[in-house]
Amino acid sequence: MIKMPPVDFDTILMAGGTDEVTPTISLKNGFTRNSTNFEVGVNGGYTRVAGDERFDGQTQPSSSDNVSQIVSIASYVNVPTVGQTITGSISGTTAVISLINGLKLNVTKIAVDDFVAGDIISVGATTIGTIDDISAGPDSAEEFAKMRNATADIYRADINAVPGSGSVLGLVGLSGVLYAWKNNVADTVCDIYKSSAAGWVQVPLYKSVTFTVGDVTTPSDGDTLTQGGVTATIKRVMLQSGEFSGSNATGILIIDAVAGGNFSAGAATIDTTTLTLSGAETQLTIAKGGRYEFTVGNFFGRLTTIRSYGCDGVNNAFEFDGDIYAPINTTAIPTHIIKHRDYLFVSEGATFIKSVAGEPYNFTIAEGASEDATSDVITGFLVAPGDTTNSTLIVYNRSDYGILYGKTSADFNFVQYNIGTGAVPYTVQNMVDAMAFDDRGVGTMKATLAYGNFVQDTITSHILPYINNHVGQATASIINRRKSQYRLFFNNGDALFCTIVNGKSEGNMAINMPHVAACSWEGKLPSGEDVSYIGCTDGCVYQLDKGTSWDGEQIEYQLTMNYSSAGSHRVLKRYRKAAVETTTATQSFIELSVGYALGYSSAEYEQPVYSSYTAALGGTFWDTFTWDEFFFDSQGTSPIEVRMSGTAENAALAFYGSSDYVEPFTVNSATIHFTPRRVMR
């Protein structure tokens, strides 16, 4: 009897992310050669990214509050279309059609109550048919996924871009409300909008009046300013120098509800405080353009004084609390800003300036403010650990950086490090380690146990071709803390998701989106939910990690694995099948095609001939793969049995899909079944 060689197994654990440069034999199993719209999971595997959806504060498209119902029609008198509003003759309710599947209608935005059997439904005066069944449900997980997505599309149409023209220029979140900066429709000034249940609502700007001398008693926000018969409500007292107790206070008052005429130069009172106004009040306006950056902090120690501080390179720095926009005269037009310890820091060109301690409006040098020069144009600030009791301030330049050591003005010490590594503007983030992007890639700075010392590392050396193709294109960055990711956005819709767990890089993967991020904001809602937003060049704001699509457009996703030889790269193998393990968080529908290629896709081997999948995708040897397509319902963990045939020294798997209704899923591992043959000659 002829003894057949035993079947052997090559298990590939999906880990490491994308590697474009390491030679095939040297590269560990589990790396991808290229990928699109997968991310390295914080718990392992490669996860198809969640989508995004436009945001303005209204009910979100993917919200579980968006109720829908399936009704079955006996027969159509007139065939309806998606988006039409139908009315029931008995129930009296109305709803919007989101999906038509034969004689079944999925409807949403249901008013009053559900439809009932026997309802004659109509669109206006046009009869559609009679409902014969209201108990019908989706026939499969796939139909349920499509129904859910169709419902989202109906709500998506209600959500609008930020009013105005051009790109969103800046985003900041305060107390669960998102605020957006954008040029007005006439493109003459910049406006502020806030998210609300009614969509974007413009935030009005108040008026300001300056005073040169104030004395005795410190006035408060909410007091009344009086000059003769003219009065106004004080919204914000901004002390810029001196002290009221010293009778030498000067500053700005932000005021509202001016009555009785206009103020003028001369004496005025606030309760028992006397001060001298410099002139008439002025309506605040914001010059158009700019690129906004924000820091959120609390200089005054009360829950009501958590405020944002911003700059844009065009206007003065400012304080904003969701209601009051208050310009700060820093003696410069800053481009970057941060709160560090009890000081507000801003940059202009190669110089950074700090405020007086505890006084974010006061940049008077004689009272404790200071100015320091660096080696080049400053591109960002980042607060980083120093030791167990101290934090440091990293000041980034384009090709180097410096560190401000110390706790107060008395012991601050700025040290410049000219090492040739810096940061591109708006790419600096803090994930315990400092993260930044420059021409060499994404770099980290880890604090060491020795006070003030840092160790540098570049985490994108495995994808240098990708980095080189995106030099000069970075526009924004953000942190996803739940997924432990640093995310970098480029001006062509590309993004790079870098997963870092416990200070160790777990891999980087490429993302491609149909909209271009111009700014970003990451924060936490009062409920504790982490949220991330990008403001885009199309004028819309999108919430990341929401829904199953790119705001209604399909997500195209693919993985191309490295060729694996099961540890014997010169031994031919007869390939039989592969078992691919996938998981989903919600036991939802997965749509995926699995393919493979043999022997470096060499023409010397007879590549298997099954149904071939062709697509205009980039990446090495993509259209030489043979595809075995799978569209299936997943129940938690579900191995996919992939047919394989042919003989070669190695094999590479690939995965592909494109959908607007498939939820994220994870490809965890693949086990290739093969029979060893002879050594290659």
Image (cartoon, rainbow, N blue to C red):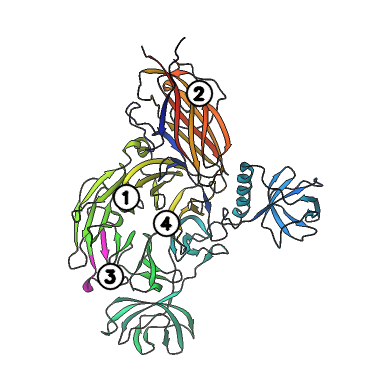
Q: Are marks 3 and 1 in contact (CB under 8 Å)?
A: no
Amino acid type, label 2 = Met
The percent position of residue 184, horizontal first and vertical second, equals: 50, 61
- Sequence-wise, the earlier of marks 4 and 2 is 4
As helix, strand or loop, the secondary structure at mark 1 comes to strand
Residue beneath disc 4? 522
Residue beneath disc 3? 363
The CA distance from mark 4 to mark 3 is: 29 Å
Instruction: Check the image and name the residue furthest to the top.
Output: 1
As helix, strand or loop, the secondary structure at mark 2 comes to loop
Q: Quadrant for residue 93, please give it.
A: bottom right
Q: Residue 435, which numbered label? A: 1
Height in image: 608 above or below 516? above
Q: Nearer the viewer, residue 500 or 463?
A: 500
Quick check: is 443 in the magenta stretch?
no
The percent position of residue 544, horizontal first and vertical second, equals: 48, 51
Residue beneath disc 2? 644
- Sequence-wise, the earlier of marks 3 and 1 is 3
As helix, strand or loop, the secondary structure at mark 3 comes to loop
- Sequence-wise, the earlier of marks 4 and 3 is 3
Q: Write down the region rendered in magenta.
A: 349-370
